[in-house]
Amino acid sequence: MPIQEVKMKAIREQLIKRLVKGEFLSGQALGEELGVSRAAISKHISALQEIGFDIFSVTGKGYRLANPIELLDESRITQLLIEQKTPAKVEVHNLIDSTNSYLMRRLPNQNIPGQVCIAEHQSAGRGRRGRQWISPFGSHIYLSMYWHLEQGMSAAMGLSVVAALAVSDAIKSLYSVDVELKWPNDIYFNGVKLAGILIDLEGQAMEPCHCVIGIGLNIKMPEKSAALVDQPWIDLSTALGVDIDRNVLAASIISALLTRLKVHSETGINTMVAQWQSQDFYYNKPVSLITGEKVTRGICRGINAQGALMLEVNGQVSPVYGGEVSLRVGI
């Protein structure tokens, strides 16, 4: 990262730490403390507003958050994981390009299996097929976990199933509701997208490989950010009508994901197929499978033990093993 960008990030990190305390901050005093002009502080404040901070200013008093924010707490998440008997190495970042990219950059020797990166904001969050993942500050969960896949890339398709079921496990355990699952990598609530999964891989096809499992889960979407999302969505707070403790939910997702990954290492997803199909939003429904310019119409028959979509076309059921495909309801 260029020196100027490092300096800008450091200043914004300092501003974040001060703003979340809920007190008025003098632009002049901040500039003197951080070694920049008052005008520069104003520009940094504007940049924070752009990523989701609701900051207002009062002449003679300075800047203050309109509403308090409870930040993700690395030590609290770590302690919750210890209490759940699934300890993991967790890093929490305020500002990052992408949690998946961060862990991928640390390959091959700077990650341990189960290592987690969580961020308050991603400047370059990614969805499938290179789409931007809108990542307003302090609003959702952006979480990635490194895993060493002993079975090799041939087993990687099952990881989306593992991750989706882990998110389902966490939400079920905390809020007693069932989500819906959409092949290959989405989680729905009442038929609308709640979360997405992105798997990054590095290694040789027939050998153990590195993987990073990314989860983006909508918690409380700011109005300004909502206008940037180009598909129907819902957030968990709205869906349930309650405030969500992101630290508790993040720890629960990490714990559930580690538990599911250990099962996957031993038996693959054989024991998970039935559960997936009980929550499969498209199961036994007519669907359109879109692959580039091609559209294939058929009936969704769930998934197989490799995590492939089972699609019935003209009475013949065949597996679809992924690639750049999308599933749509209806024919």
Image (cartoon, helix red, strand yellow):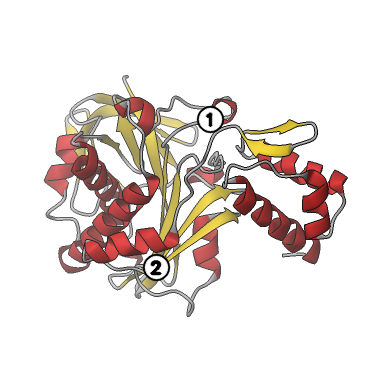
Q: Horizontal placement of 128 versus 123: left or right?
A: left
- For the point 20% across and 38% down, which residue is it? 302
Q: Is residue 200 visible?
A: no
Q: Which residue is mark 2?
A: 115
The x, y position of residue 114, in whole percent, is 34, 67
- For the point 14% across and 36% down, which residue is it? 278
Q: Horizontal placement of 2 versus 261: left or right?
A: right
Query: Rounded to the nearest whole Å, what is the CA distance between mark 2 and mark 1?
Result: 29 Å
As drawn, the label of residue 110 is: none
Whether residue 200 is situated above or below residue 202 in the rendered picture: above
Residue sitting farthest toward the bottom: 109
Which corner quadrant of the image does residue 86 belong to?
Answer: bottom left
The x, y position of residue 251, in whole percent, is 32, 55
Q: Is residue 240 visible?
A: yes
Q: Which residue is mark 1?
A: 222
Whether residue 81 is situated above or below residue 217 in the rendered picture: below
The x, y position of residue 85, in whole percent, is 21, 66
